[in-house]
Image: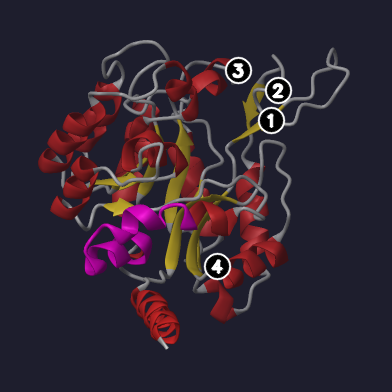
Amino acid sequence: MPLFRLSLACLLALSSAHATAREYAYSDAHLHYVDFFQETAGMDTLLKAMADNRIEHVMISGIPVAKKWHEDEPKRPRYYAGDDADAYWYSATDVIVAAAVNTLTPEQRQRFHPFLSGFNPNDKNSAAHIQRMLDLNPGLWQGIGEVFTRHDDLTALTSGDTPRANNEAMTRIYHLAAENDLPVMLHSNITSKREKNPLYLSEVEEPLRNHPHTRFIWAHAGTSAEVHRHQTQLDFLLPTLTRMLEAYPNLYIDLSWSMLTPYLLDERGTPSEAWLKLVERFPDRFMLGSDVVGRFNKLGKEMRSFDPFLDALPKQVARKVARDNFLSILPRNR
């Protein structure tokens, strides 16, 4: 009899824990439909991954560069860092994204939020190109990005000058974004692989200050796997982000995978109290992104990897970060 009572108590406890466990609906704020060779697993695969993992909305973009298979390379590289061949700006990536979205039913389209990315951020003609793309597909594009500026070794591999988030070409794009109510997602590393200070911070902070009517999503909060390979953790990141979120109400943070560890979670998967407090202080300014590239088999795993951090937040804040904050920055006239 005592054993029966113990088993029943265990069952009730498990049932109660299951009943209180949170399940999130997600918005993926950072998804690339194609890879660095402009290839993709396709829209049917993406739709299934979304349906299987409660991903209700996705930001969908191309990749603004294509990796060259150089004449001197005997094997086709699998990634942009696979060999020393360069990459080049590739505008047709937006055509691929537009064609894929245009195959969807009207109901399905409501869940997809295409961002324009196929332009050279060093070219002062790029703003005119973006406007042409907006005119060709009225109402399709809902944002600009991911714009590649400072981007690890890809910066050195990409043909042409080093792009900066605060150059004149990008200034024209920020004005156009404000006029069309489009958010801009920037990839701009906060520092180099070995500098233990926010070396490139001014390249992001200057546009935030000069374009208060443009909404900026900072991809990975300026971090990257390559930076972390050389510097396990950027000690200045949390205080820098705190100051910037206080100063710039037009700044939003994409918490995609390079932010998960070592910042949001430690090696044991325990949420960081300091980062929890920051997100609770600015509950409308953080969003989740998978940053998958052309393949969608790990999409659900990438999004669910944030659950331990979300579970440690107040329920209302967690649901904003998981789903609502990304939707809130999209063009209001939709």
Vertical side of 256 occupied by 80: above or below:
above
User: Which element carries disc 3, helix, strand or loop?
Assistant: helix
Marks 4 and 2 close (CB-CB < 8 Å) = no
Q: Position of residue 98 (x, y in %)?
A: 62, 58
**Magenta residue span:** 304-324
Disc 2: which residue: 82
Q: Earlier in the sequence, mark 3 or mark 1?
A: 1
Q: Is residue 162 left or right of residue 332?
A: right
Marks 2 and 3 close (CB-CB < 8 Å) = no
Disc 3: which residue: 157
For image coordinates 55% across by 67% down, the residue present is 53
| Residue 276 visible, this angle | yes
Q: Which mark is residue 174?
A: none
> Which quadrant is home to the N terminus?
bottom left
Q: Nearer the viewer, mark 4 or mark 3?
A: 4
> Which quadrant is home to the C terminus?
bottom left
Q: CA distance from mark 3 to mark 1?
A: 12 Å
User: What's the residue type where badge 2 is placed?
Assistant: Gly
Q: CA distance from mark 1 to mark 2?
A: 5 Å
Q: Is residue 164 magenta?
A: no
Q: Nearer the viewer, mark 4 or mark 1?
A: 4
| Residue 114 visible, this angle | no
Q: Nearer the viewer, mark 4 or mark 2?
A: 4
For image coordinates 68% across by 70% down, the residue present is 103
Disc 4: which residue: 53
Q: Please tell me how crowded label 4 is: few (under 14), some (14-19), or many (20+) other residues with Cα within 10 Å.
A: some
Quadrant in the picture for residue 332 = bottom left
